[in-house]
Structure formats: structure tokens, C-alpha cells
Amino acid sequence: MLTNDTDVANFIDTAMFDRTFDEGMALVEETARYLDGKGREEARTLPRKAAMLYAGESMRVTTRLMQAASWLLVQRAVRDGDMDRTDALHDRYRLGSREICLGVCAEETDELPALLQDLLSRSDNLYRRIARLDDVLFGTAEAPPGARGQMDALAQAFK
């Protein structure tokens, strides 16, 4: 496990973390623009059943992105010295809502607008990567001992 301060600090100081942070924040903005604009218009034209599915899946994408953004912001706050690492280890700062965010839609999403389907896919990918990082960095996934094992575990989180 990568649970000591040095391991976590080393990770959050990497370009990999910066890229993930930038990707997450950009996806949050893109999704908000879509759901408040074109997505709202597209939802009005959907048949009733598809509109209900749209509502549920738009909540799922929003939940995924809010959880991912919160996790990324906490890690950046630690890196920037705005939050103490021991505070950030508290369960309330871990990635949450896994049962919702990792759940599979019970219905086919083919009737949903293509852009929403794309946002669902990309948010799922981002959330899963952050979930693996959260597990590796904070305690539920075992990393092999030594620096090589820890680097391999981090690389695995981005596959």
C-alpha cells in the first residue's frame, strides 16, 4: 500500500496527477455546459421512457464527476499545502458513491443522445481510474513492496 506521506506526495507531484486533474476539471465543465444547454434541449425531444433514462444517467454522470473532482481537489490541496495529509486520509475525503458510480445501467442507452453516451463513457473511465488510485494510495489495494512495485501499481491504475 502507498499509505505514507512520501508515497502520496511523490504521486501528487507528478505530471500524471496534473493531467488527470486537468482532464477531470475539463470534463466537469464540458458536462455542465452540455446538461445546461444542448442536453436539456435534446432531453425534451426524447420519448418518455428514454427521457426517464436520460434523467437517471445524467444524475449518474454528475455524481461520478462531483466525486472525482472532490477527490482531485483534496489531493491538490494537500500538494499545495492548503490541507494536511492526515486530514485528507479521513474517510470523508475518499472517493465515494461507488455503488452508484460503478453501477451499470439496467437499460440500453442507445436511445440517449450521442454526446450524453460519450460523457457517460468518459466519466466512467475517469472515475474508475481515480477509484484505483484511491485504493492504491489509501489502503484497499495491495501494491508489491519497493519502489518498482509502487510505480507499477500506479501505472496499473491508469490502464
Image (spheres, helix red, strand yellow):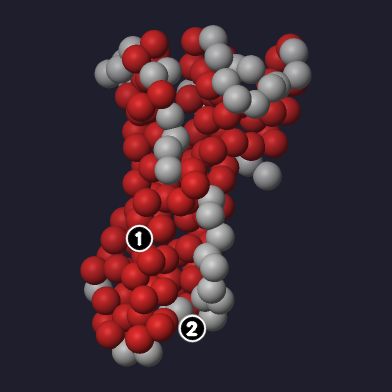
Vertical arrangement, residue 34 with respect to residue 149, above or below = below
Q: Is residue 119 above or below residue 148?
A: below
Residue 60, position in %: x, y?
A: 41, 58
Could you tell which of marks 2 and 1 lies nearer the N-terminus?
Answer: 1
> Seen from this angle, which residue lies furthest left?
36
Which sits in the foreground, 25 or 102?
102
Residue 95 numbered tag: none
Percent across and percent down for residue 140 are: 60, 25
Q: Are marks 2 and 1 in contact (CB under 8 Å)?
A: no
Q: Please tell me which residue is depicted at 42% across the width and 38% down the height of the picture.
A: 96
Q: Residue at x 74, y 13 (%)?
A: 145
Whole-number angstrom distance, CA of label 2 to CA of label 1: 17 Å
Depth order, front residue of 57/32: 57
**Does residue 117 show up?**
yes
Which residue in the protein does label 2 denote? 111
At which x and y percent is residue 13? Answer: 48, 23
The amino acid pointed to by label 1 is Met
- Residue 75 in the image: state x and y as whole percent: 40, 27
Classify 10 Å Cα crowding around label 1: few (below 14), some (14-19), many (20 and above): some
Q: How many marks?
A: 2
- Image vertical order of residue 10 relative to residue 104, above or below: above
Q: Is residue 151 visible?
A: no
Give the structural element (helix, strand or loop) at label 1. helix
The disc placed on residue 59 is 1
In the picture, measured across the screen, residue 159 lies left or right of residue 101, that is right
Residue 59 shown left or right of residue 158 in the figure? left
Query: Circle 2 — which element?
Result: loop
Q: Quadrant of the N terminus?
A: top right
